Image (cartoon, rainbow, N blue to C red):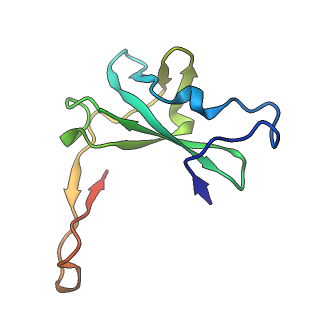
């Protein structure tokens, strides 16, 4: 079960408030701007951050500047900025192949 909400300190006294992540700029390890944190997703079963939703993405890295969910395991450091240990060279979107059943849906898949 995943939620984009704040983890309460009463349930985990060592937890950082996830709101401190919001609006932080995100960079690759090489110093390339990726975007900024729009939301934080929490795995409530594991009681940990599962991913960061990055918005206002760099068009040279993310096709169409779509929002991307970055797995938290890719986060190397958090302070005044977020530094990622890994990020793909290029994120592209690909339209889902249409079939007669799917004519009404128009979903972009992020690879």
Q: Residue at x 73, y 40 (%)?
A: 8
Residue at (52% x, 14% y) in the render: 80
43 to the left or right of 106: right
Left or right: 47 with respect to 67? right
Residue 24's spot in the image, x, y percent?
Answer: 46, 23
Give the quadrant of residue 58. top left
Residue under the image location 55 percent in, 24 percent down: 76
Q: Is 63 drawn above or below residue 102 in the view shown?
A: above
Q: Nearer the viewer, residue 15 or 101?
A: 15
Position of the N terminus, as image quadrant, is bottom right
Please tell me in which quadrant of the rendered image residue 109 appears.
bottom left
Using the image as rendered, state which of residue 91 and residue 34 is in the foreground. 34
**Farthest residue in the bottom direction?**
101
Residue 42 in the image: above or below residue 76: below
* Residue 78 spot, x, y in % from top left: 56, 21
Tell which of 89 and 58 is nearer to you: 58
| Above or below for 98 versus 10 | below
Q: Is residue 27 left or right of residue 15?
A: left
Q: Position of residue 108 (x, y in %)?
A: 25, 58
Q: Quadrant of residue 72?
A: top right
For the image, the number of numbered tags is: 0
In the rendering, at what x and y percent does residue 64 appear? 19, 42
């Amino acid at each position: 079960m995943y939620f984009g909400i704040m983890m309460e300190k009463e349930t985990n006294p060592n937890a950082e408030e996830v709101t401190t992540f919001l609006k932080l700029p995100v960079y690759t390890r090489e110093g390339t701007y990726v975007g900024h944190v729009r939301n934080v997703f929490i795995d409530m079963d594991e009681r940990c951050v599962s991913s960061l939703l990055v918005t206002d993405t760099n068009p040279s890295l993310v096709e169409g500047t779509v929002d991307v969910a970055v797995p938290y395991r890719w986060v190397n450091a958090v302070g005044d900025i977020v530094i990622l240990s890994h990020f793909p060279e290029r994120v592209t979107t690909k339209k889902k192949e249409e079939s007669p059943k799917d004519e009404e849906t128009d979903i972009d898949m992020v690879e």
